[in-house]
Image: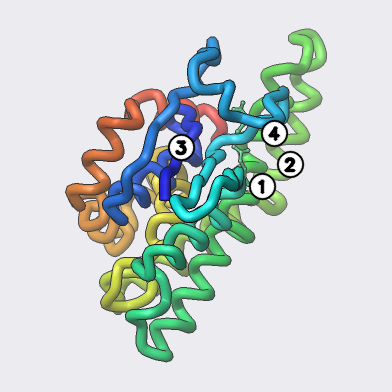
Amino acid sequence: MHITLFHKTNSRSQRILWLLEELNLDYELIHCDDPIPTQGFDKLPNLNSTLKFPTVQICDEHSTEVISLTETAAIADYLSHQCNSLGMAQLSSSEMLHYYFWKNFAEATLMPDLALKQIFAQIVLRTPFPVRFISKFLKFGFDQGYLNDALQQHLFRINAHLKDHIYLAGNHFSIADVLLWFPLLACTQASTKFAELLHIQRYLQKIQSRPAFQRALEKGQWSATVFQTYWSQAW
Ligand SMILES: N[C@@H](CCC(=O)N[C@@H](CS)C(=O)NCC(=O)O)C(=O)O
């Protein structure tokens, strides 16, 4: 299986880079930061403004077909299934329940709420200065009326779960951990209140000390400062 990953620095695609390192797969990495390089893009079929990161192209050695896949969770599921690793195969039935729950919670609950922070922050930034107070007021109202409380509840729930579990599924590191890492780190970097949650801190230190994680940071040109600035400005 030959894999090409189209990657943008400090974006969601860092998780797929990490997963490729965890699975010890052979892959080609194409950095797509602005300005987007032309090299490597001849491989992409429909290159246009809707290109999303991560995108992977997978070429099976037994066939000439090349498949393109987007959606972080879909790519993680596919690769984990192909390698029979970091998925549910090694889990007990109670661990499997946690695995399914947290894997979906990451993408369907935490990530969308986190994205709302960024959407409202961008609306404020793009509102002409003389009327910016209106969008600031809207953001404030939405933050106070829904979003801050929702994010706090999510983080408290994760912290409570990690009090009794080493990883999200239980005793086994899985793609649920890879998927949740990005929104969880964004929240803890953006708000000091979340940074104080001890079980989350212990957990983040543990998963971030994995050699595959460290290799992926280096290969992906991850910048902790840029990431923290980007997310804390949205709060
Ligand atoms: N639900 C998709 C969202 C992918 C997505 O929107 N990625 C962002 C980067 S985090 C992107 O590609 N934005 C367009 C761009 O940066 O040019 C996934 O999780 O893979």
| Residue depth check, mark 3 versus mark 4: number of the one nearer the observer | 3
The answer to whether mark 4 is within 8 Å of ligand 1 is no
Is there any visible trace of residue 66 in the rendered image?
yes
Q: Nearer the viewer, mark 4 or mark 2?
A: 4
> Which is more foreground, mark 1 or mark 3?
3
Q: Which residue does the numbered mark 2 point to in the structure image?
A: 141
Q: Quadrant of ligand 1?
A: top right
Choose the circle earlier in sequence order: 1 or 3. 3
Question: Dot 3 corresponds to which residue?
Answer: 4
Q: Secondary structure at mark 1?
A: helix
**Residue 27: horizontal and vertical position, in percent?**
36, 40
Relative side of 211 to 74, left or right: left
Nearer the observer: mark 3 or 2; the answer is: 3
Sequence-wise, the earlier of marks 4 and 2 is 4
Total numbered labels = 4
Identify the mark nearer the N-term, 4 or 1. Answer: 4
3 or 2: tag closer to the N-terminus: 3
